[in-house]
Amino acid sequence: MDLLVGQLFTGLSTGSILLLAALGLSLTFGQMGVINMAHGEFIMAGCYTAYVVQQIAGDAGVSLLIALPLGFAVGGAMGLVLEALLIRHLYHRPLDTLLVTFGVGLILQQVARDVFGAPAVNVSVPPALRGGVDLLGVTVPKTRLFIMGLAIVAVTAVALVLRFTPAGRRIRAVVGNRDLAETAGISSRAVDAGTFFIGSGLAGVAGVALTLIGSTSPTTGQSYLVDAFLVVVAGGLGRIKGAVVAAVALGATQAVFETYSTASLAKVGVFIVIVVFLQLRPQGLFTLRTRSLA
Amino acid sequence: MLTLRNLTCGYGRTPVVHDVNLDVGTDQVVAVMGHNGAGKTTLLRAVVGLLPAMTGTIELDGRDLTRTPTHRRIAHGMAYVPQGQQCFAHLTAGENLRLVADGRKHGKTLIDEQLDRFPALRPLQNRQAGLLSGGQRQQLAIARALITEPRLLILDEPTEGIQPNVVAEIEAAIVDLARSGLSVLLVEQHLGFALQAAAQYAVLRSGRVASHGATGAGARERVREAMAI
Amino acid sequence: MNRFFASRPGTWAGFAAAAAVLFGLAPLVLSGFRLGLLAQFLCYAIVAVGIGLAWGRGGMLTLGQGVFFGMGAYLMAMHLKMADAAFRNGPGAVPDFMELAGIRELPAYWAPFASPVFTIAAILLLPTGFAVLLGLAVFKRRVKGAYFAILSQALAGAFAILLIGQQSLGGFNGLSRFRYFFGYNLDDPVNQQMLYYIAAGVLLAAVAIALQLRRSRYGELLLAVRDAEARVRFLGYDAANIKTVAYATAALFASVAGAVFVPIVGIISPASIGIVPSIMFLLGVAIGGRATLLGPVLGALAVYWAQTTLSEQFPSGWVYAQGLLFVLVIALLPGGIASITALAKRIPTKRAPAEAAA
Amino acid sequence: MNTIALTCTDITVDFDGFKAVNGVDLELARGEVHFLIGPNGAGKTTLVDAITGLTPYTGSVTKDTPGTGAVELRGKKVHHIARTGIGRTFQTATVFDNLTVAQNLDIAAGAHRTPWTLLRRRRHLPETVTATMDRIGLTGHADTPAGILAHGQKQWLEIGMLLVGDADVLLLDEPIAGMGHDERETTGRLLHDIAADRAVAVVEHDMDFMRAFASRVTVLHAGAVLATGSVDDVSTDPRVQAVYLGTKETADAHTA
Amino acid sequence: ACGSRAGEETQAAESCVDTSGDTVKVGALNSLSGTMAISETTVRDAIYLAVDEINAAGGVLDKKIEIVAEDGASEPTVFAEKAEKLIREDCVAAVFGGWTSASRKAMLPVFEDNDSLLYYPVQYEGLEASENIFYTGATTNQQIIPALDYLAETGVKSLYLVGSDYVFPRTANAIINAYAEAHGIEVLGEDYVTLGSTEFSTIVNQVKSAGADAVFNTLNGDSNVAFFREYANVGLTAEQMPVMSVSIAEEEVGGIGVENIEGQLAAWNYYQTVESPANAAFVAAFKAEYGADRVTSDPMEAAYTSVHLWAATAEKAGSFAVADIQGAADGVSFDAPEGTVVIDGANHHVTKTARIGEISADGLLHTVWESEGAIEPDPFLDGYDWAADLTVSK
Ligand SMILES: Nc1ncnc2c1ncn2[C@@H]1O[C@H](COP(=O)(O)OP(=O)(O)OP(=O)(O)O)[C@@H](O)[C@H]1O
Ligand SMILES: Nc1ncnc2c1ncn2[C@@H]1O[C@H](COP(=O)(O)OP(=O)(O)OP(=O)(O)O)[C@@H](O)[C@H]1O
Ligand SMILES: NC(N)=O
Ligand SMILES: [Mg+2]
Ligand SMILES: [Mg+2]
């Protein structure tokens, strides 16, 4: 029973971390089709934002509250610059964005190394989030509950915006057909930049949140990237609902594998599960069908 | 209304449309005709700004829009229905309409007006536009264009792929719109309709205006002749 | 109709020139160390030829070539370790690293690798067979574009992690310390040069095979699948099979490259086959010109050469230069280095080869 | 020799409860150009999708080939259906833009080739390819990349690709969309020409074109067959006029 | 002719080290990029410091040392490539560097084939001895076994093992298991995570429910941050269940956050707080060079010591030639910050003092136990009966 509850919770918790890391990608990759390999470095930028804020503000609780919006701004700003300088010219070559942003990621890592030093830095957890609460016999760390809460808030916000607001419709319209969106009076440039800003900003937020559980070093973001991409793919490109289910499912799969074999094999297990899964749903969990060819 | 002067445009470095001069007067319908590949679509894309003009100018009501981005041209009163029944496939039909109604004063009313004009769309509002049939999508595209309350409507083969009785309705609608103060730049293969609806015509051949004039007596022969060579 | 049948004498001249440079000039002007480096880069270039075929021609963005490279490398390394153990302690002896890992009995799956013939067959067949299975599984279900790219990337990640967990394959450390290559002493400079010649020969062979595939009807078909996969299906072809052939060929090239790589470099470890090395394989191809025959080769050589040179010159800042190189070349030269000549000649640009996406 | 080439029995396509095609029976005979008309959204394209294996359905489609006999197509994969001799075109022409006209046709002719043939270079163009190129009037464009052909030429190339592929049932979705008057004429004659020993089904909204070239017409409405018969039969059918053609006056008013 | 076949003797490449000028070149080969840069950059700083000191004091054999730096990029193949480049192109007299065992194993054949010298400054899993490598970090009997002795002494009867999935933790845990069996300690669990993993909820909950007396932690790098935070979060403390770590030094404590790790234990040979004149000088010089906020750690100290040992050996041999250095090495000693270290010419390891440290609120480690004098290196654990099954007849 304990174990089961524990696993369930671990799955949810791992899932929410994955989700937080993947949410920005579900906009920039899922919606816009940009395979942004520097997304991990945007997460890393969020981590260092939290670090810098804490150095200045001192109090861990206050600095977390400041760092969350600031991380969004920092990640978003980096995304804006990247979009304006490079990605804007590559929308018709989506797979090339992967290579270009990989190069950008290398550079950003080195920048972090030169600015903050290669060794990891510490971001303190606010006292209020230290320790755990006992839920059904297992100890659930408060930091993870916080991250779960944050993930839920972020996902809900993104889903609502995409689904029900004019801005969300515009994003989906530009994604679907750039030229047509222009002729519908929408500035695709502004929408692209805005979407990329939000997606990258979410990476920054994820980074701030991840300092609560992991380390902050120049290579921090990388470890989340591949899993985050898998979440977006397994969920169905651009489907927030899919990303949520996929993140939790991957988290749970990982947790279960980890209990019954080694953590290393868990990664392999997750991969096999995904390949098998794509046999059943080649376009991901939730897909929007269209009748176009190709 | 719309004035094109020496407009040349094309893809990459290759011009496809050469040196076109064309005027669409207020409340006027101008039909552009020509064979496949003559450059009709290319011309329209340049007018709305999806292709840059290589040389020449595009003016709307005396305002030079040659370098204005597409979405701003729409704000200035152009509306464009592209060839090929295009819509936002991942949005529902309703969202396709709301997308352009967003931010307009009487958005809801505007949508309703168009649904009245194309009643077939009413029950389809919650279906994903990508799943609609070709004809349904075309009606949706025209409705979407009209919601922006344009002064100049640019239509690229609007009746292609539409069932005959709806073609008749669309044609009637265009004539009606023109009467109610809308200028229309129309690319159309249905010669009969084009000449009946339009006051002026132009025939493109290999990207150049091969013949143009009023659609009065003898126009049909002149068009046929210009097209045949 | 000339375009069709004209055999291009230029191609043969190119081959001859390449062979002359590789076999004649390079060994003359390069030091033993540099020649060894070049041999290593040639291995990467062999991988690149395969990627050029699968990605440039077939539209399959394979972010996981490290898997096949690694398979070939590990298979070869297993043989070298077996031969090494046999030489020191008699047939069937346990390789040194296993002793260290506390493995006293030779695992059963190692035993066949005592045989050179079995090893070579395995290098040719195992990764290729795996690619066929995976290709069919994935392409039959029409997984493509970014999906395929991300999936293959995850595969590389999972494969590296799997290897790290296998102590009987050296785990994180991988396999190293090879003394003999099919009986030849590996620390002898003459034999090191022989390895270089082998790498060069394999590369030329790979290019020749790729050339034949490109010129054949199959090559046109592959292009057709890249541009309009559904249409090909309606003509009665099984597009999945067509893609799988290119994918498996790329896997074969990568595997052979890995097998040649091992005696040249002297180590194979999970660090050489994971996600980042796999992307590096790809970058060479993109930078050289993915859609061309020789672009991937030149690109791979250029990328690794630049990496080595830059890191020697600026050990602590070279990553900036490398990152910038990737960004600038790919952003500014969509067709890669190979397209410079095309730009120069001002060949009227057709529409850019349709992107392999979606 | 008006033998039946394709028989559809009780085809139903259900999209999450919405029956886009609902119990359609249809026979296509060799020697006929069979027009499939009906309002937008009637299910014409969906029916073609079903036959060619793109959409799951219930019911049965059998292909009758002289010599081989009848085969059931339901459940077969797209490329297997294509190999039984069913060819289709799409509402928007899809040809291989980066290949030349000749290469396009050569590929289309080659679905039965052995792997060995595929792996070799083409020494000369197959007879059927040159002949077909003539027939669709593109001999002069043999070496032109298909991507830069004019719209109509692409449609013809697409039809040509079906011909060299030995398709004997052709399903053409709006093949003259966007064509000028003369091109329509040419296409119509081409269709009649190739229908001599094949079954050709054409989905089209152009009534002039239909009147000029249809041997037989089936009208779909709301997923079901509303009427079937000769051009005269259907165009005088009041139900067809009501849902599709419009009243006589409006229909005539706009014919050129 | 294709060179020599198996069994034939081959001539190692002729050394190109040039000592005719007034400088001698050495290589510094550390990862400056990639995941290992996090640790290895600090080692490089220590190498530079030692070289500067020696040069300031007049150099070695009256020659100034000139460093040729290369980036190992956290990739074993790059280490092999750069090592070969340093030896064959730059003609360095010796190379200092490497961190992971993977990088060492990649470089080993290069140094052997080219008959050159590597000074490897990191604690490692033992079971190795090459003529061409000097191992200046601890081998297992200088770190792991003393740590176990300490735990056993303090009454630990059960252990839980947590490690990164690679060779060092796996070998260490094999030794721990053998030790535990021989000393009546129960091993309640053994878990490995992928290098760099931050997912510890499952493991920490398992550790907690297993209720061991202590945890033996061989996690490497970043993973420690997540592990210790999670550990504290589920309410485990150093008093309840101490964690003995063998890869956490002063540098890492900063990144983990001292609040998460205060009171926990580590096993090394050197801490910044070691009290000796040599260390006072080392720490002062290091801070003067690199900033007062920087800390010194065991691998840095070993790297620093390496350079001095090499210089001392060269002085003793009166030559930079590899054979001469090898010949002169036995018994060469250096008054290192950790205490005097002596090279064991038989296995090329050095004697080292084992120390258990406790992490305190100032972020530093303070010695709570230390071995009586320096421990002789025993890389193959020949001196431990219970380890007979682990070791190979070398
Ligand atoms: N994206 C493109 N890139 C390059 N050339 C193009 C492109 N699109 C069209 N063309 C070429 O431009 C010419 C004019 O095409 P356009 O689409 O304007 O013709 P059209 O008159 O609209 O024909 P249709 O009646 O078929 O719609 C054709 O030769 C066509 O091949
Ligand atoms: N995948 C789908 N899911 C739901 N509804 C669909 C789907 N595909 C098609 N439809 C609906 O099925 C109906 C039939 O569409 P179909 O495309 O077959 O019409 P059509 O007769 O070809 O029309 P047109 O003449 O306009 O091309 C339409 O109402 C369409 O919206
Ligand atoms: N030698 C080590 N710590 O890998
Ligand atoms: Mg057009
Ligand atoms: Mg249709």
Image: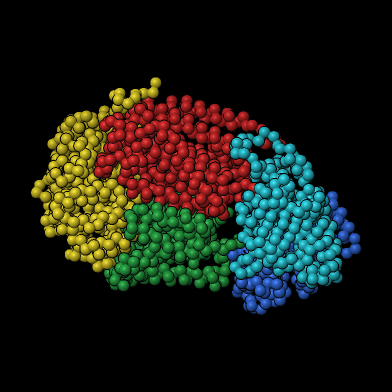
What chain is the yellow one? E
Tell me residue B226's x, y (percent): 84, 54
Horizontal side, residue B43 vs residue B218: left or right: left
Residue nearer the viewer, E28 or C128: C128
Q: Give the drawing colour for chain C.
A: red
In what quadrant of the picture does the C terminus of chain D appear? bottom right
Viewed as shown, does residue B150 lie left or right of D16?
A: right
Report which colour depicts chain D: cyan
* Residue for point 70% across, 59% down: D8
Asked if D245 appears above or below C49 in the picture, the reply is: below
Residue E344 percent location from the top left of the image: 15, 38
Q: Residue furthest right?
A: B217
Residue B143's place in the image compared with A81, above or below, is below
Q: Which chain is green?
A: A
Q: Looking at the image, can residue D243 be seen? A: yes
Q: Nearer the viewer, residue E139 or E170?
A: E170
In the picture, measured across the screen, residue D215 lies left or right of residue E213, that is: right
Residue A257 % position (x, y) = 36, 58
The way the protein has been coloured in the rendering is by chain
Front residue (pair B61, C184): C184
Q: Residue furthest top?
A: E1
Name the image quarter holding residue C94. top left
Would residue D255 be seen by someone viewing this image from the given angle? no
Q: In this rendering, would C139 be left or right of E100?
A: right
Residue under the point 84% across and 64% down? D233
> Which residue is at the front of the view, A183 or E2?
E2
Q: Position of residue C289 (x, y in %)?
A: 54, 42
The quarter of the displayed image where residue D126 is located? top right
Of all chains in the rendering, the one displayed in blue is B
**Going 19% across and 49% down the picture, which residue do you hit?**
E178
Task: Name the residue located 75 percent from the left edge and 43 percent from the top edge.
Answer: D132
